[in-house]
Amino acid sequence: MPGSDHTADLGALIQTHAPLLKQAVEAIHTRGYWSAFPESPSTRIWGANAPDDGKAAFDAVRDNDFPITTPGAEGTVASERSPYGFDLGVRYPHLRSAGVAEVVAAAGTAMPAWRDAGPDARVAIGVEILRRLSGRVFEMAHAVMHTTGQSFVMAFQAGGSHALDRGLEAIAYAAEAMAAVPTEAAWEKPRSSGEPQRLHKTFTIVPRGIGLVIGCTTFPTWNSYPGLFASLVTGNPVIVKPHPRAVLPLAITVAVARAVLAEYDFDPNIVTLAVEADDERREGLASVLALQPEVRVIDFTGSSAYGEWLETHARQAAVFTEKSGVNCVVVDSTDNLRRLAANLAYSLALYSGQMCTTPQAILIPRDGIATDTGHLSVDEFVAAMESALAELLDPPAKAAAILGALANDGVAERLAQFANATDVAIASRPVVHPDFPGAAVRTPVVLRVSADERERYGNECFGPVAFIVDTESTSESLDIWRELVSTRGSLTASVYSTDAAVLARCEEVAMSAGVSLSENLVADVYVNQSAAFSDFHATGANPAANASLTDAAFVASRFRVVESRRAQ
Amino acid sequence: MPGSDHTADLGALIQTHAPLLKQAVEAIHTRGYWSAFPESPSTRIWGANAPDDGKAAFDAVRDNDFPITTPGAEGTVASERSPYGFDLGVRYPHLRSAGVAEVVAAAGTAMPAWRDAGPDARVAIGVEILRRLSGRVFEMAHAVMHTTGQSFVMAFQAGGSHALDRGLEAIAYAAEAMAAVPTEAAWEKPRSSGEPQRLHKTFTIVPRGIGLVIGCTTFPTWNSYPGLFASLVTGNPVIVKPHPRAVLPLAITVAVARAVLAEYDFDPNIVTLAVEADDERREGLASVLALQPEVRVIDFTGSSAYGEWLETHARQAAVFTEKSGVNCVVVDSTDNLRRLAANLAYSLALYSGQMCTTPQAILIPRDGIATDTGHLSVDEFVAAMESALAELLDPPAKAAAILGALANDGVAERLAQFANATDVAIASRPVVHPDFPGAAVRTPVVLRVSADERERYGNECFGPVAFIVDTESTSESLDIWRELVSTRGSLTASVYSTDAAVLARCEEVAMSAGVSLSENLVADVYVNQSAAFSDFHATGANPAANASLTDAAFVASRFRVVESRRAQ
């Protein structure tokens, strides 16, 4: 009988994953270093065949039908091209607006049983999906690399293991939030005399509705997993709508989720994949899905314009958005110029500045700064950055491993526009990728502007474009920084100073403007990096994002509690 | 030196309130019966002089200036009239739209020090405000009675002790949510060889901004305290904007808060009072305040129309609303007709049906129901309800103690309109209040309608108006109930059935439509009642409210976390 097997299996699964979950819940409260998924692609961890098997799995879906079904889809669509210079040719079920009602209905049908499974079962299923995905991490790394343009190692880490950690982190928050609500209570209110009043109460976690996850092109897994797993384990069926140019990583994710769900006798339509063609984006499958009354939670990463559209129009849903912003670096003084420059150069170069966490505006007093090598003019600072970038990005193989490839023509065009400007301080140069000569690999361009050119450095230039901004003083740097955080939004901020008073002022700006701060990073941790279980990614307190990955607020409103009480 | 005293006092206060807070946090997770503030107005608890002292304090502010200042206010305004038949004449600082910038600026100025005080201090101050308010509970009972029309005992309980419990409950949730974030962490990431990467990280709870609490006429304290205290202890200065006809209870509250804050050397403008004249409501001080960019959290209780206006327009803020709805009772069968009728009669009569939790639509199969006294026709059910109401509401003193007074002319006019209808099944009658002959005291009117008269019983009729709705069957009753919850919203739901299968179907409707359910209440607990620390008031899952009092989602987004990290 499937029913009893189902229960038995689920019970075992809950037990299996309980220790990991306990560690994860502990980690979110101590926030020291912790990770559940190894970030190294070493064969010592994964076995000698893992790299080849992963590559083979990736190759097997190329120019092929991806093995998945989507209710309401008709025919297939293939719209991915690797930034490394070839079409993927993977064909996915094609969901058009006309099919939306069907996929929404399928999710709705799946909902009650998923709700009734209860938090423990849902959480265990969520962890199991992550575990299975971890087993396919080499395949995932190729999928992420060839949709985003990340280098293989970065795709393995950020797109694989770190994304899984972010997913587990969200599950830990959700599990804890649900566990905080008792399933039942005996209520006994004493009277002045006689027997107390007695009620028996039950409390049921119910989903908010259907979840919608709208993925982005650059971090399809890392940015989607928190919302996907938070919605899923709190009882919401989830429709995953990838960016048409970065489908494969989320298709693999959804396929694994559906397989695990089916294995435990749940309706696989608890997680579905919604793929449109790239040239249909203006029609907007995402928008059609987002406005369905049954869709009650939306997670989105992408442009401010579309994020704000969702916040404004999808009023029936709780909308969690990570949008664009301008990240600042305040350079005031340093006792280690060489390592400052090396650290900052790495931050600008990593994945060609195509991270929402990449610094864009480097604010430095026009009279120069104090350093361990004496007073440094801004010209000398520019020279130090140029040397650091040159050293970092040579030879080409090393450069390619750090830079990855430009994700798409839009980034390349934006770079070209800035690279031809008159105020270029450090030129961008092309790099020939040793393995993929068709890839667009470019070093960052750094422009030199003055503080009053706010419209130039104060608008997001997504990609390898940064500005060294001459300011009147560190005080003006702080004023500009505060204003940019408050008006344009920031995902990160960074300061270099040997002056405790300046650091204290920076911390005050960070707290009041609502952005997290990295201070004097000179070793091999970079401002761009955000570690699950320790760093909160975005604060939700400035225009760049209305939520944080991950905190209690990110999960708490994804479910509701329905009480039932009766006399005893 | 004030600084050191300040610190010493705060430390002592934190210690003093720690045990109560611990109990409160335990209570929100066990959800059995627990209360911190005695609900009985007995002199054995409060002392022989407490009733007279409270009355004297209330009398002292009548026709007088209320002792409070509000930045930006000019002159005074007095707009309260007791539903028991006299003008209060209390004069408050008059805040007009022109003064809003000043009160907002004052709150903004107060914010950083309040943030820097940290969660423990803020929580202790919050609990201390509640403790001081408890010491003025008799005065508060008169204030609530003579603004809302509640009877004295109800005003003492719902407006006094139960409101304080709801405030403490919100503080407990907020304290726990803030405590879940560590203040610092040592992050050590191992490397494959050599020393680990090390960062020191600090995490600071920062407020979302300024909180705005918009009070209602019927439960000025009970419905305002959760938002007020949740915002306050999470670091948000709070502007309290009472309804012009129910100012005094919140003026006392704000005055106590300001006194406690000042005593501990905080800026009293962390909590301010914003009072407009009753005839200015259309201009809308609430709306002007709600649209200030600095206002980032809004708590509102009142009409659906205005709640939806806030949700739509105050986009810069997290908006928590409790709006109107239609509450249903499903009558299927009973093994105790007499007590069913008595229980339901009390629910209809309590505070003249002026509770958001009062049942409005009693759904019963037109062929009657099975009872312990045999088959009962709907006519007989009506007769049973009429007898129960007659028995409950006699003599007049007892009737007045249950009914209280109609809060305002609007309620009286609505009642009059329904009382003159042709489908009245149980007539409303006036009751002469023994102490306040000027009070409008009326027993409920009950109308008899058919299931297809949806527009009649399916729109909220706030006040002592209920409908007995003849349905085809209990199945149709469930369909109507589900539809009304989903489309009109409900704060409560109730079912009477001896059939376990019917109860199970009701629980399924409750879970999927998102409303809490009371089953077979026949003793002296009523569907209208919602106990802090045990019952969730509203689910946030249907149109009647977008939040629940109180759950983790109610507090989690009132603060953000700002991280700072540096190399070690």
Image: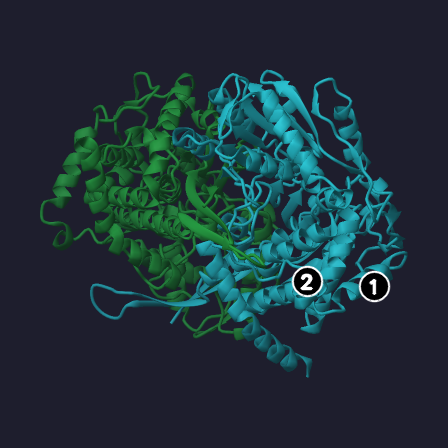
Chain colours: A cyan, B green
The circle on residue A42 is 2
The circle on residue A479 is none
- Label 1 chain ID: A
- The quadrant of the rendering that contains the N terminus of chain A is bottom right
Q: Amino acid at mark 2?
A: Ser
x, y (%) of residue A538?
55, 41
Q: Amino acid at mark 1?
A: Ala
Left or right position of A396 against B192: right
- Label 2 chain ID: A
- Under circle 2, the secondary element is loop
The circle on residue A56 is 1
How packed mark 2 is, by other alpha carbons closer than 10 Å (few <14, some 14-19, many 20 or more), is few
- The quadrant of the rendering that contains the C terminus of chain A is bottom left
Q: In the displayed structure, would residue B272 be above or below residue A351?
A: above
In this view of the protein, which residue sits in the foreground, A537 or A525?
A525
Spatial CA distance of label 2 from label 1 is 17 Å
Left or right position of A279 against A467: right
